[in-house]
Image (cartoon, rainbow, N blue to C red):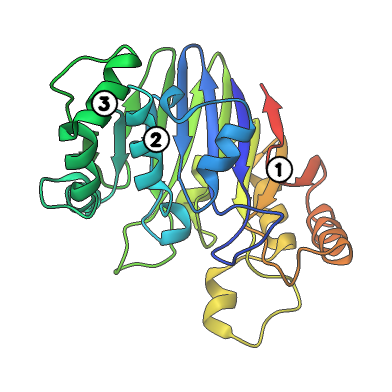
């Protein structure tokens, strides 16, 4: 199993970091977890193409976790992949229809690319055939606790306290070849998420707040600080911990050093700050 961090940032525009997106490769499957703004560019920078992605799972539908969804599906389609397995909470089906349906946001473009003679000739020159079908993602709407089995891997899930009841939010665990990777999504601390993390080889956990940021009590209650994340990971027996979702104001040399020191004050194993295009092999 190989994990590439494509986007380790937040909703803020930031040259150093794309928004949330992580690629997990197992055998011939390439599994994308979330697809925030900038993730498709990072995917291409990593040496992969949008059409290489076989599965896309959404933890939740905040824009910084799905803004590049339309771009991914359209770019993969332009490369010849008509369908891709897309699994996430409602209303991902209606969002997809609003993007790629016959009256969707991209319908004008799709009519032109499939009906204009010049576009048809370009498509045929690439080795395509006519009539050219529109993008048709294979959508599965799921709830926390769903289970998915791929070719040599399995994904389990649980609810992640974050933006309910407006959004359904989840954390994921992928297991393959005796190894395990947990992605918290955006999550407060919870017994359910901690259980999902149990004995994980790698945990990737969001870190929106520094230890000293306590004035906004609701944010503090829903956004664990680096030391709290480390403490939870230590209890769960996690072997390697990465913190992610870094904000611009803390993404400085001093801020990163402080966050890492706070993590290591409670977590005794290997801990790092996730960076775009970092790769982990298990």
- What residue did someone put label 2 on? 75
Seen in the picture, residue 147 relative to 66 is either above or below; the reply is above
Q: Which mark is residue 241?
A: 1
Per the image, label 1 sits on a secondary structure element best described as: strand
Between residues 196 and 22, which one lies in front from this camera angle? 22
Seen in the picture, residue 110 relative to 49 is either above or below; the reply is below
Callout in the foreground (1, 2): 2
> Could one spot residue 136 in this view of the protein?
no
Q: Quadrant of the N terminus?
A: top right
Between residues 42 and 66, which one lies in front from this camera angle? 42
Q: What percent of the width, then of the height, locates residue 275?
A: 72, 46
Q: For marks 2 and 3, give the CA distance.
A: 10 Å
Q: Residues within 10 Å of mark 2 (few under 14, many from 20)?
A: some
- What residue did someone put label 3 on? 82
Between residues 171 and 75, which one lies in front from this camera angle? 75
Please give the name of the residue rendered at 66% of the width and 62% of the height, measured from the top-left corner.
Answer: 14
Per the image, label 3 sits on a secondary structure element best described as: loop
Which badge, 2 or 3, comes first in the chain's sequence?
2
Q: What percent of the width, then of the height, locates residue 92?
A: 25, 49
Which badge, 3 or 1, comes first in the chain's sequence?
3
Q: What percent of the width, then of the height, locates residue 195?
A: 51, 43
């Amino acid at each position: 199993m190989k994990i590439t961090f494509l986007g380790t940032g937040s909703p803020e525009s930031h040259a150093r970091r794309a928004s949330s997106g992580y690629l997990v490769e197992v055998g011939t499957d390439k599994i994308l977890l979330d697809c925030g703004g900038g993730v498709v560019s990072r995917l291409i920078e990593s040496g992969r193409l949008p059409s290489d992605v076989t599965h896309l799972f959404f933890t939740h539908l905040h824009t910084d976790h799905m803004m590049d969804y339309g771009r991914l599906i359209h770019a993969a389609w332009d490369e010849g992949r008509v369908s891709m397995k897309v699994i996430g909470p409602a209303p991902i089906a209606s969002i997809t229809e609003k993007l790629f349906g016959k009256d969707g946001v991209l319908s004008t473009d799709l009519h032109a690319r499939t009906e204009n003679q010049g576009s048809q000739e370009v498509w045929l020159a690439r080795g395509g055939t006519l009539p050219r079908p529109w993008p048709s993602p294979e959508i599965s709407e799921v709830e926390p606790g769903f289970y998915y089995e791929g070719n040599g891997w399995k994904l389990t899930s649980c609810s992640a306290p974050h933006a309910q009841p407006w959004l359904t939010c989840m954390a994921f665990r992928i297991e393959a070849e005796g190894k395990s990777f947990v992605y918290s999504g955006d999550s407060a601390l919870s017994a359910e998420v901690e259980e999902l993390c149990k004995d994980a080889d790698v945990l990737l956990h969001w870190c929106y707040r520094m230890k000293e940021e306590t004035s906004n009590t609701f944010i503090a209650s829903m956004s664990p600080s680096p030391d709290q994340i480390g403490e939870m990971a230590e209890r769960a027996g996690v072997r390697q911990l990465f913190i992610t979702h870094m904000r611009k104001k803390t993404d400085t040399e001093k801020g990163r050093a402080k966050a890492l020191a706070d993590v290591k004050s409670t977590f005794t194993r290997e801990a790092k700050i996730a960076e775009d295009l970092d790769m982990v092999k298990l």
